[in-house]
Image: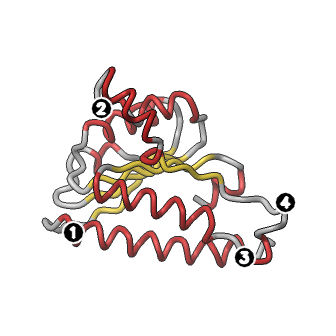
Amino acid sequence: IYRCYQNRNIVFVIGNGGSGSNASHFCEDLGKGTLRREDFDNDQKKRLRILSLTDNTPYILAWGNDEGFDRVFVEQLKNLASPGDLLIAISGSGNSPNILRAVEWANRNRLVTFGCTGFSGGKLKNLAQHGFHVALDDMGIVESIHLTAFHWIVDHLHKRIGIEG
């Protein structure tokens, strides 16, 4: 994430259900929470470029309805992503078809991929280039641990980016 900040690459976050909620939450926290209060009105302050692809409801519904739910994230990446960008894919089971399809495309198109998984990790655990695996069989606990890790990352980046102000 910090490399993306430094190089002006975009961080994309995706997930379904509770993991989708975590994707939205993580995106908001990183976009705002990495800034110092005095940077809010500073138009010269470099900001982290981040987008949760779970939040584009009309786009998701159009692709899901017309072409299939497995395309809702990959088609957004095709419009927005460039080599060097980062895709953070959150899937408790690690087997969500729309997540896997997006990660496969991202790998082929030179994005960095990071998977957050639970249970056995599913296919995502080995498909993503990097990952955080919570080896528990309780979705609620997996999602809670993911969110706790996300908060730690935001705090760490807030300190790291803030000193560059």
Q: Residue under label 3, please give it.
A: 36
Name the residue located 60 percent from the left edge and 34 percent from the top edge: 82
Q: Quadrant of residue 150?
A: bottom left
Distance in Å between CA atoms under marks 4 and 1: 40 Å
Residue 78 at what x, y percent from top left?
Answer: 51, 28
Distance in Å between CA atoms under marks 2 and 1: 23 Å
Q: Earlier in the sequence, mark 4 or mark 1?
A: 4
Distance in Å between CA atoms under marks 3 and 2: 38 Å
Above/below status of 64 relative to 88: above
Q: Of helix, strand and loop, which one carries label 4? A: loop
Q: Of helix, strand and loop, which one carries label 2? A: helix
Crowding near the residue tagged with mark 1, few <14, some 14–19, many ≥20 C-alpha atoms within 10 Å? few
Q: Residue under label 1, please give it.
A: 140
**Amino acid of disc 2:** Asp
Q: Which mark is residue 70?
A: 2
Name the residue located 42 percent from the left edge and 32 percent from the top edge: 74
Pointer 2 with pointer 4, Cβ within 8 A: no
**Amino acid of disc 3:** Arg
Q: Quadrant of residue 59?
A: top left
Name the residue located 24 percent from the left edge and 42 percent from the top edge: 96
**Amino acid of disc 4:** Asp
Above/below status of 14 relative to 119: above
Distance in Å between CA atoms under marks 3 and 4: 13 Å
Crowding near the residue tagged with mark 4, few <14, some 14–19, many ≥20 C-alpha atoms within 10 Å? few
Distance in Å between CA atoms under marks 2 and 4: 38 Å
Q: How is the image coloured?
A: secondary structure
Above/below status of 116 relative to 81: below
